[in-house]
Image (cartoon, rainbow, N blue to C red):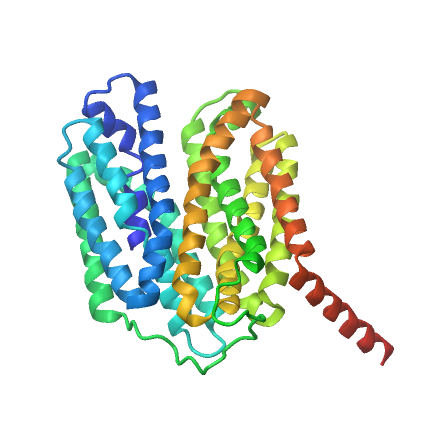
Amino acid sequence: MRNLTLTFVMPFMPLYVQQLGVEDPGRAAAWAGLLNTATAATMALAAPLWGRLADRFGPKPMLLRATLAGAAVVGVMGLAASPWHLLGLRLLQGTLTGTVAAATLLVAATAPAGKAGQRLGTLQTVIFTAAAAGPFLGGTFADLVGIRASFGVTSGLLAVSGALILLGVDGARAPSGAEEEPREERAGGAVPWLGLVPVLVALFVVQASNTGVAPALPGFIAELMEEPSGVASLAGQILGAGALAAALGSSVGGRLAQRLGARTVIFCSLVLGGLAFLPQAAVQSVAALWALRIAASFFIGAVVPVANLAVRQAVPPERQGRAFGVAASVTSVAFGVGPLGGGLLASAFGFEAAFLVPGVLLLAAAGVLLLAPRSRARAARILKAAAAHIIR
């Protein structure tokens, strides 16, 4: 519900800015972009701190703090008198909210033996589904009850979400002696940051690639159509279908990681996602673009929960909060950089570049993961086992 509510306001944010005095549609769109970037920036700065506090006090209090703070701040947004008021509230929202790290830690810590990958996949499935449903429902409510009242609706939904967390979520950690999945070698109780770099790079690239195509998509669709009409709705449908495909990919990826290993699934998903991205720059029809977007989104969706599983397996339980906090910070930066980079690429080199560059970056991230020492060692073990099986 939390992710549903935070994407709920996206469709009418430019319209709200116009109501607050910025009458020019172009300037209103720029303000809307600034407002989204502001939230991502402060969330990226605050996430590691909240992760450390989650290690000390547990993930449930952090999840409650973020949800209830979001309810208060979003509710006040409906009372804003100027865009500057809204900007200040969005900065505050990013600082106080950011429940993804706490929710991920809570799911990872309380998952039954052998079910962490599946549970993390389910969590990410819900997040992607909310990303698809939130804008649609937000636009509908804005038309029905008005924009200011829609912020009140969003606040109410967040408050209900907080109540559900308070009454229905067990914040206890799994017993420290229960090892559900094979864990990578650790240096004492420290966070192995160097070993996590390839996973964090993968998280950054998939999130930036997923959001970076949005600014270029409507213009690219218009170029593919003989008589451009209904471009905005068609772009929305493609993005929504991609979000649903990513949700399915998250579920499948989480399950496969339990059998094949987290890094194997991440590597394969990055390669297949990159190969699905590259042809999008050369498509000649909207149908082909739609099919490739669904395929790429499926593989991108598989990376996120499995990357979180890799973090869980590599980090001691008492340090997982700060590790997931840094992962959330990386994700927030990607959400800010992705649309900005996609827009700049489309403006400077044409719409095709906004699809070509992410494909190259996904393949490069796969290369970084493959070249990591642990990944090379795992690949060698797999090849050795396969050779022994063939010899027998």
Q: How many marks?
A: 0
Q: From the viewer's perspective, is residue 164 above or below residue 113?
A: above
The residue lying at 28 percent from left, 60 percent from top is 63
Is there any visible trace of residue 58 in the rendered image?
Answer: no
Q: Is residue 13 left or right of residue 77?
A: right
Seen in the picture, residue 267 relative to 30 is either above or below; the reply is below
Whole-percent x and y of residue 73?
19, 44
Residue found at the far bottom of this picture? 177
Residue 249: percent from the left, percent from the top? 52, 56
Q: Residue 109 appears at what percent x and percent y?
A: 39, 71
Quadrant containing the N terminus is bottom left
**Quadrant location of the C terminus?**
bottom right
Give the residue at x 69% y 67%.
378
Question: In the visual, does 241 lie left or right of 379?
Answer: left
Q: Residue furthest top?
A: 24
x 30%, y 44%: residue:
94
Front in this rendered view, residue 309 or 92: 92
In the rendered view, would you say 218 is above or below 134? above
Q: Is residue 299 visible?
A: yes
Rendered location of residue 186, percent (x, y)? 55, 70
Q: Residue at x 52, y 58 (%)?
A: 193
Q: Nearer the viewer, residue 82 or 354?
A: 82
- For residue 352, which quarter of the picture? top right
Establish if 23 lies above or below 307: above
In-front residue for pair 77/141? 77
